[in-house]
Amino acid sequence: MNIYCDKSKLNPLKLPRHIGIVMDGNGRWASKKHLPRIAGHRKGVERVQEITEFCGNIGIEALTLFAFSDENWRRPEEEVGGIMGLLRWYIRKEHKRITENNVRFRVIGDRRKLSSDIIELISALEKDTYHNTGMHLCVALSYGSHGEILRAVRKIVEKVKENLIYPDDIDEQIFESCLDTQGLPPLDMFIRTSGEYRVSNFLLWQLAYAELFFNEVLWPDFDTEKLIELLKQYSLRERRFGMTPEQVSLKQNESAIYLKR
Ligand code: FPP
């Protein structure tokens, strides 16, 4: 058994393949401590490092983090500049570690709105980790699900116009292959911190069958212990995908027999 699962008493067979997190509550964390909002984002980046490392160690296949939404561009210029500065700092500082740890890095969202030096840093890290085989670390930046879906629709329309596909060919697989998340495993688990009960335009298509977890902890306080607690709750959920409980348990028994062979 994976030593990290052993230590945290997690069942490796009942872990999600892909986790998506809305890292909310940085501003409130800072206000509570009478600090500027950027101090909350800074602490948030520390949690990103901790949670990413832990997820990689326990064998999570993909982690998608909502770092900056399409809507976040509406925030005061000073805060937007502060978050972008942190991202720049994070990618520069983590480039070597992410590459050497076999992590596959990807940014989803409309990167045309980002400054050119950040685009270059992202592209370099994506290129250098492209052939890695470990966990996908996917950062949603300047991201909104509506925008992503519209980009996918435009790509499909182009394919139809070029006679590469017929309208009747368009199915879920083709649609998914045009989303920013193409190639990632299905989203199994959605987490939002800070006691907000919204999905806020995050991975709307991908959320179709994800298990949802909303919790009160502010992102800068969200540590490995908290994640382990949620992963244990996840392992107890019965995911039926439209089937009956009997069909689900039959399927589980069949795969248990298959695994024993
Ligand atoms: C939400 O908290 C958080 C954000 C809008 C930014 C999140 C960014 C980071 C954690 C840093 C960059 C990430 C990476 C991957 C390096 P909020 O400001 O909305 O908090 P509030 O609701 O308490 O005001």
Image (cartoon, grey):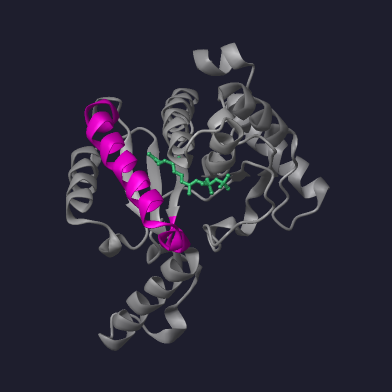
Q: Position of residue 51 (x, y in %)?
A: 48, 29
Q: Position of residue 82 (x, y in %)?
A: 35, 45
Can residue 24 be seen from the camera position used here?
yes
Tell me the magenta residue range: 69-98
Q: Position of residue 50 (x, y in %)?
A: 45, 25
Q: Is residue 91 magenta?
A: yes
Q: Is residue 10 above or below residue 36?
A: above
Which residue occupies the extreme front position in the image?
Answer: 34
Q: Is residue 13 above or below residue 4?
A: below
* The quarter of the displayed image where residue 153 is located: bottom left
Count of numbered circles on the image: 0
Q: Residue at x 52, y 16 (%)?
A: 4
Q: Residue at x 61, y 43 (%)?
A: 191
Choose between 14 and 218: the one closer to the eye: 218
* The quarter of the displayed image where residue 16 is located: top right
User: What secondary structure characterizes most of the magenta part?
Assistant: helix
